Every structure is written in C-alpha cells, then in structure tokens.
Image (cartoon, grey):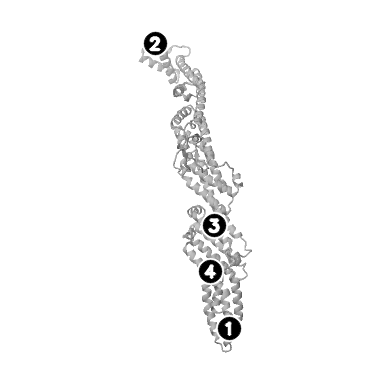
C-alpha cells in the first residue's frame, strides 16, 4: 500500500514538472528542486523513463471515472423517477458534481492523449447524466403543479361561482369552498411548491454548470408557456389574427375588447409577475438564464395581447369606435408601469418597445377618429329641411358624442398633447380640436339653414340648434374645455338669431298698422298659422320668444286700436274693421311654436 502511495506521489511530481516546464531544461530544473526537499523525490526516481510517466496519475483519473460511471449509469438507467426518493436525487447530484470537478481539474492536461481520452469519456458520461436530469426536470415541471393546490382566485371569463367537483358529494350542511371573482390584482400565484422549486433549482444549477443551460431553459419555458397560455385562454381571450379582428362585427368586437381588458390586467398584474418570480427562484444565481427563460415563457401570450391591441389601433376609424378604442388606450397606458417593471431585462426589450409603439399607435387612432368625425360633419348633406325649424340630427349626434368623449377629458388631453400640434398660449390641443369641430358644425348648420325658403324659419332653425349647442357645452366637461367666453359669445349668437327672426316677420307686420288694417289682419293670420307649426324645443327659449313678441305687438296694436276707434269717420263701425282684440292677439301669440308631431321629433 505504501509503495503504491509513493508511486502516485512520484507520478504527480512528474506531471507537475512536465506541465510547468516550458521545455526539457526547465522541467529538469523543477525535478532537481523537488529532489532537494524530500529524499523520496531523488533525481534518479523522478528521472526514471517509465512507459507513460504520467501513467499512475492517469490511472487515478480512470479509476475515478469508473466509479462515477457506475454511479451515474445506475441512475440514468433507473425506471423510477430519481426525484421520487430524496436520497437518490442527492446521490445523483453529488455524482454529477464530482464529475464536473474532476473534468475541471484535468482540463489543463487535455492535450495529452491519455488525459484527453478520459475527458472525452467524462463528456459522454456528463451528456448521459444531463439527458436524464432533463427528463427529471421536465417531469417535475409538468407534475409539480398538479400536486400543489392553486389559489382559489378565479380568472376565467364566467361570472358564476365555481364549486370544486370533488366537494359535490358532501352534505348540504358541509362548508363548500367557493372561488370568488377577482377584485384585487395585488397578488402573486405560487404555481409550484417551495420544495419543487428547490429541486428544480438544484437541477438547473447542474445543467448550467455543465453547459446545458439552453436545454434547461427550453424545457422550463415550454412547460410554463403552456400553463400561461391556458390561463390566458381561460380568461376568454381568443387567439385572433389582425385579419380576424377586422372581420368581426362591431358588437362582437366590443365584447372581445371587454375580455381583452380583463385578460391584459390579469396577465400583466398577476400572471407575468408570478412567472417572473418563479423564474428568478428556479434560476437563482443565473440571471441571464432566468431572463431568457422568462421571455420565452411570456412572449407568446404577450404578443397575443399586443396583436389584438394593434388590430384595434389600425382598424376602422369610424366615430362610434372612439369609446372602445379609448378603453384599450387607457388599459395600455395604465399597464405601462407593469410592462416596464416585468419586462425590464435585455431579452424582453423588444416586447417592452412593442408595447410602447402600439400604445402610441392607439393614440394616433383616436386622433384619426376625430378627423373622421370632422369628415362626417363636412359630408352631411343639406338636402331635406328639418320640419318646423327643429333640432337637426347632426347637431344632436355631434353634441352628445362630444359630451360623452369629454368624460375621458384627461385621456384625450394626453392623446392630443402627444401629437405634433402646437397649442396656443391659452388653449390646449384638445381645446383647439373641440373648437374646430364646433366651428365645422356651426358652418354646416348655416348651410342647412339656407334650405328654408322663409328667412324667419331659417332663423328659428339656427336659434334651436344654437341653443341646444350652448346647453350641451355649458352642462359638462365640454364647457370646461371651451370656456365661459365661448359660451357667452354663442349665447349672444342665439339672441341675434332671435332678433333676426323678429325683424324678418313681425316688425314688417307692424308697419301695416299705420296704413292697411285689413292687410295686417291677413298677414297676422298667415304668420300665426305658419309659426304655430314651427317648433322651439327649449321651453325657456319658447317662452322668451312669446314674451318678446307680446312686448313688440301688444302695446303697438293696443294703441292703434284706440286711435282707430276714435276716428270720426269710423266711429261706431270700428268693429267691422277690427278682427282681433288685444287679448285675441296675445292668445294667438301664445299658440306659436307648438310645432307638429313630426317637427318635435
């Protein structure tokens, strides 16, 4: 035994001399130094030219490989999962560690044929061990979650309570666990138990140390990606191409957007952070592998979410889509911090940048929808007149549309500030946009007023629509945008229409009182008959008009009747010429602007 130990010692000394000596002279000098320290390292013994002077050292390496081969082969060929027994898994990992260390210790001598052959054999052994550990890793990934109870929060698209089928056979009095609908996104799912995660970490550590990091990441991401995609699917989100989205009816698309909003929030706030934490725990100490694996896990689901948002952004820009596009824009905006934090590493940079690009594209879509609204106003024809000078459908549509849009005023402010426009000193870009739409609407109404042959009726039309516009502006966020000065100016416009109406019909009629009573009576009859079918939708405006007309007509008519009755040549025959008393005129004025059924619609 002692002799064998001395041979090993001499073999090691020769190997050191040969390794450190760059030429034969240096190696000989090193051997000479060894001989001065210990009698066993005599120059003669160290210089002996034995076949394969490193033969004893290589023999040590071979014996170590034989021992490890025996251990590893037993585990590699085992029918049962190695990780079903903690002792077996620990022994298997120890054997792999020894093989890694042995290979590392002898790598410097790989140029020597005997050592190189041993290292080649060690590489084959390591590959077999890695194939088996990869199988164990996959099995633990796939089955680890099955044995670990998930949180009772439910993320699927149905609203009904879910009862575990295993509990159905319990008595009615038994307490049955019921999953509650999700109300709080501030939670993390543990998809695997801590023990399973620790086992996976130990496996991953060996695979990465042995150079099998990509294989490990591939197995991990494949398993978790399947789980994640199933989770997103349970939220009701379909896998749709951009073309599929564009072919959907608007009602179906609205429903799909609602499901997308829920899925995006759950994915970015719960599922992705949970996957990030799991990756970091399994690949603890190997940040690059963790980042790569996480990107591979989440990429498919993230692209699915982003593609849908992109399809909405590049789809039709008809005005009725504004509100749902705003919902998608606001969801993307609110989730940007999650995109930044969850996808913060270099591998996820592409996903993060794509999210920002699509978010901005949604803003472009919103601005495009407002442009389409402008075109809709411009193209609205001025063919048929609204009966009775009433409220035009385009006025009702545009004003209600803008009022609804301004409920998202802060979002719209953000959207328009991100455009390339330059706001004025006192106005935001959204204010400029709204003012422009109002100007287009007013110009359109001016053109439509020309359809009426009676100038007085055209002024009633402008008065009605102008009053409606002012009311809708004053009572909401639109008024905040346009400001009090805008409201005052447009109130003045309505009053101007009022005065124009009065001048175009009633002032001219008063002139007849001075000359031709009979003609006045005829004119009064015609005007009252016509104007009673006209409509003034606003009760206050209608009353203001009647009061204004009464103040205009009654004093003048009363004075005229008094003078007329005192004329010498008329005298007692005055009643033959006077058709209406003052009270009659007042009564007829109060019948004005009641409109027909058609005109009031």
Whether residue 556 sits left or right of residue 452 in the image: it is left
Residue picked out by circle 1: 575
Using the rendered view, name the quadrant where residue 32 is placed. Answer: top left
Residue picked out by circle 4: 542
Q: Earlier in the sequence, mark 1 or mark 2?
A: 2
Q: Quadrant of the N terminus?
A: top left
Q: Residue furthest left?
A: 37
* Count of marks overlaid on the render: 4
Q: Identify the element where label 1 is drawn.
A: helix
Residue picked out by circle 2: 2
Q: Quadrant of the C terminus?
A: bottom right
Task: Give how far apart the Cα atoms at labels 3 and 2 are.
Answer: 100 Å
Q: Earlier in the sequence, mark 2 or mark 4?
A: 2
Q: Whole-percent x and y of residue 247?
A: 61, 47
Relative to 35, residue 475 above or below = below
Of the pair 396 and 297, the residue shown nearer to us: 396
Q: Earlier in the sequence, mark 4 or mark 1?
A: 4
Mark seen at residue 163 = none
Q: Residues within 10 Å of mark 2 (few under 14, many from 20)?
A: few
Task: Give how far apart the Cα atoms at labels 1 and 3 are.
Answer: 57 Å
């Amino acid at each position: 035994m002692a002799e064998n130990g001395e041979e090993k010692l001499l073999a090691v000394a020769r190997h050191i001399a040969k390794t450190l000596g760059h030429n034969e002279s240096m190696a000989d000098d090193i051997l000479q130094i060894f001989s001065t320290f210990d009698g066993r390292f005599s120059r003669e013994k160290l210089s002996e030219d034995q076949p394969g002077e490193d033969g004893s050292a290589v023999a040590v390496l071979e014996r170590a490989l034989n021992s490890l081969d025996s251990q590893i082969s037993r585990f590699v060929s085992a029918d049962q999962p190695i990780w079903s027994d903690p002792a077996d898994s620990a022994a298997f990992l120890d054997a792999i560690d020894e093989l890694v260390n042995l290979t590392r210790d002898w790598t410097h001598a790989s140029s020597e044929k005997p050592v190189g052959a041993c290292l080649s054999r060690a590489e084959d052994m390591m590959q077999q061990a890695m194939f088996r550990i990869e199988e164990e890793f996959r099995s633990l990934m796939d089955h680890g979650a099955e044995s670990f109870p998930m949180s009772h929060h439910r993320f699927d698209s149905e609203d009904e309570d879910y009862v575990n089928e295993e509990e159905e056979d319990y008595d009615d009095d038994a307490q049955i666990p019921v999953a509650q609908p999700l109300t709080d996104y501030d939670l993390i799912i543990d998809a695997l138990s801590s023990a399973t995660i620790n086992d996976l970490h130990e496996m991953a550590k060996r695979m990465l140390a042995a150079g099998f990091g990509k294989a490990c990441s591939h197995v991990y991401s494949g398993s978790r990606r399947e789980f994640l995609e199933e989770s997103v699917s349970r939220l009701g989100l379909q896998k749709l191409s951009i073309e599929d989205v564009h072919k959907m009816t608007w009602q179906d698309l609205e429903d799909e957007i609602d499901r997308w909003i829920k899925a995006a929030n759950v994915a970015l706030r719960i599922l992705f952070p949970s996957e990030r934490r799991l990756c970091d725990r399994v690949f603890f100490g190997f940040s690059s592998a963790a980042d790569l694996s996480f990107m591979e896990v989440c990429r498919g689901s993230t692209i699915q979410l982003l593609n849908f948002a992109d399809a909405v952004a590049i789809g039709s820009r008809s005005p009725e889509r504004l509100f749902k596009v705003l919902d998608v824009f606001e969801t993307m905006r609110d989730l940007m911090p999650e995109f930044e934090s969850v996808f913060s590493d270099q591998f996820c940079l592409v996903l993060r940048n794509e999210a920002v690009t699509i978010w901005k594209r949604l803003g472009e879509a919103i601005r495009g929808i407002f442009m389409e609204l402008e075109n809709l106003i411009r193209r609205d024809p001025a063919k048929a007149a609204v009966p009775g000078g009433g409220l035009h459908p385009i006025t009702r549509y545009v004003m209600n549309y803008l009022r609804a849009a301004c409920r998202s005023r802060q979002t719209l402010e953000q959207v328009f500030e991100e455009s390339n426009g330059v706001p004025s000193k006192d106005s935001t870009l959204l204010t400029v946009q709204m003012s422009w739409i109002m100007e287009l609407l007013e110009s359109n109404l001016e053109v439509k007023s020309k359809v009426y042959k009676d100038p007085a009726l055209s002024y009633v039309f402008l008065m009605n629509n102008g009053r409606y516009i002012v009311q809708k502006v004053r009572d909401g966020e639109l008024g905040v945008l346009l400001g009090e000065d805008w409201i005052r100016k447009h109130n003045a416009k309505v009053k101007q229409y009022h005065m124009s109406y009065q001048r175009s019909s009633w002032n001219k009629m008063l002139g007849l009182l001075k000359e031709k009573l009979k003609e006045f009576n005829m004119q009064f009859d015609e005007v009252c008959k016509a104007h009673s079918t006209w409509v003034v939708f606003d009760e206050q405006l209608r009353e203001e008009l009647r009061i204004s007309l009464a103040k205009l007509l009654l004093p003048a008519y009363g004075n005229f009747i008094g003078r007329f009755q005192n004329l010498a040549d008329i005298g007692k025959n005055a009643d033959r010429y006077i058709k209406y008393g003052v009270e009659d005129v007042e009564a007829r004025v109060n019948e004005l602007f009641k409109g027909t059924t058609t005109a009031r619609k």
